Image (cartoon, rainbow, N blue to C red):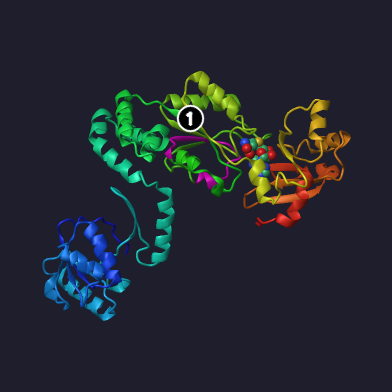
Amino acid sequence: MSDYPLFAKLSGRPVLLVGGGHVAERKAEALLKAGARLQVVAQQLSPQMAGWQQQGRLEYLGGEFQAGQLAKVFLAVAATDDAELNRRVFQAAEAAGKFCNSVDDLDNCSFIVPAVIDRHPLKIAVSSSGSAPVLARLWRQKIETLLPQHTGRTAALAGRWRAAVKQKIKSLTERRKFWEQLFHHDQTFEHYMASGNEAAAEALLQQRLESHHNQAQGEVVLVGAGPGDAGLLTLNALQAMQAADVVLYDALVSPEILDLVRRDAEKVSVGKRAGAHQVQQGETNRLLVEYARKGKRVVRLKGGDPFVFGRGGEECQVLVKAGIPFRIVPGVTAGLGATAYAGIPLTHRDYAQTALFVTGHCRPDGDKLRWQTLARGNQTLVVYMGTIKAEEISRELIAHGRAADTPVAVISQGTQPGQSVRTGILQDLAALAADAPSPALIVIGEVVKLRDELQWFRV
Ligand code: SAH
């Protein structure tokens, strides 16, 4: 049977606590914080609890537990080091129809106390239904680090404005958007809250509310999805993906990442890999503008980083022209992600002081100067979309002075479960790249040798 989660209002309500040691003290502290009228049965009270008794914060009922003590209370907590006594308290509570928690004894509990992240008035409770309290605690810690301390104050402030916002913004969806925009995307508001300037935050909220017109204004977020491993997404990327109404995604975006998009969002596949059927860039641009004009929150999800060989710049230009607000969330580009997962550092004091990201997709047109620059020693060349041009790249680099035995690597599906890496020398690059699974990245330079030593990601 699954537990029913609830938050109990104990303020002013009598609660029986059996036990007076350290564990009981912790329970007492939490119960007092919730405003419970605490009645304690214990052979002896800890110094802290004795202090609370003197301050009149708890009532001491003596050392003997009796079932009759349960009559008036709402719930009971058994926190002694005597398992038999705890069990007796629980059984008496069952007979009296009261909720009871016996510390660390799941069989003798009718309620359990979750691990709590407290940002009053915001509270998050984590429970493993008693089966793995340590796991629940670990999750609490993780969530704890995600929630800035001022989240509680933000929640309290929102609480004060809830009615006014409801009054002004009639539609539920619009209200959700208003709050999401304020909490997640309004950097100024966030800054005021983080720095404790609540008055300014409140003034800003008022201003946002006044200027809110009920007609929706869409926006586009260009999000870099990274090279494939979902763990490489940024927190901003994840937030945008979970707030989206529509997601336009490229073929390069891994299924694992698409799974993290808000379930109700419309997902539209746009780019296909070069060669295959392809939604034209013009069509993608048109869709971006169209969805945003309908008031949708559009996420344009792109492989790697949107501004690295991703046409992100062109898409932004279209948005500027159409007067549509946009934001950009950078991503880990393949040149950083795939090389790191292949154990190839881009620079190294002994081998490379420069790293160049180039695309194999443009027409080099025998540009002599460009080849001379690319063929320089002591640098790492990272070639995107280069496999089809591998033969030409290898020939020209050698012709312009790069040693024919310069180490090279072809990294396919970098950071993904199917990652494969082929290594060899520059003069054999065409053969290495010939049937490499796509997407594939070419790396040229002495640093490739370090892979033998640094290889760590095994699939
Ligand atoms: N904006 C993307 C690049 C798009 S161009 C980024 O920043 O990564 C597409 C090229 O990127 C592919 O042809 C390939 O060369 C490279 N690429 C993208 N993802 C890759 C991956 N997971 N492994 C290897 N190469 C990748």
> Which residue occupies the extreme top position in the image?
321
Which structural element holds mark 1? strand
Left or right of 351: which side holds 78?
left
Regarding residue 307, the answer to whether it shows in the image is yes
Q: Is residue 437 above or below residue 171?
A: below
Look at 47% across and 23% down and name the residue there: 324
Quarter of the image for residue 136 reads bottom left
Indicate yes or no whether the magenta region holds residue 63.
Answer: no
**Disc 1 target residue:** 220
Label 1 environment density (alpha carbons within 10 Å; few <14, some 14–19, many ≥20): many
Regarding residue 162, the answer to whether it shows in the image is no
Look at 42% across and 27% down and name the residue there: 218
Residue numbers of the magenta segment: 243-259
Residue 285 x, y percent position in the rendering:
55, 25
Quarter of the image for residue 186 reads top left
Q: Quadrant of the C terminus?
A: bottom right
Looking at the image, in which quadrant does ligand 1 appear?
top right
Q: Nearer the viewer, residue 418 or 86?
A: 86
Left or right of 80: which side holds 391?
right
Q: Nearer the viewer, residue 121 or 193?
A: 193
Indicate yes or no whether the magenta region holds residue 249.
Answer: yes
Q: Nearer the viewer, residue 34 or 422?
A: 34
Residue 55 x, y percent position in the rendering:
16, 62
Number of dots carrying numbers: 1
Give the amino acid at mark 1: Val
Left or right of 373: which side holds 274?
left
Q: Nearer the viewer, residue 453 or 106?
A: 453
Left or right of 218: which side holds 66?
left
Residue 38 x, y percent position in the rendering:
17, 64
Q: Quadrant of the N terminus?
A: bottom left
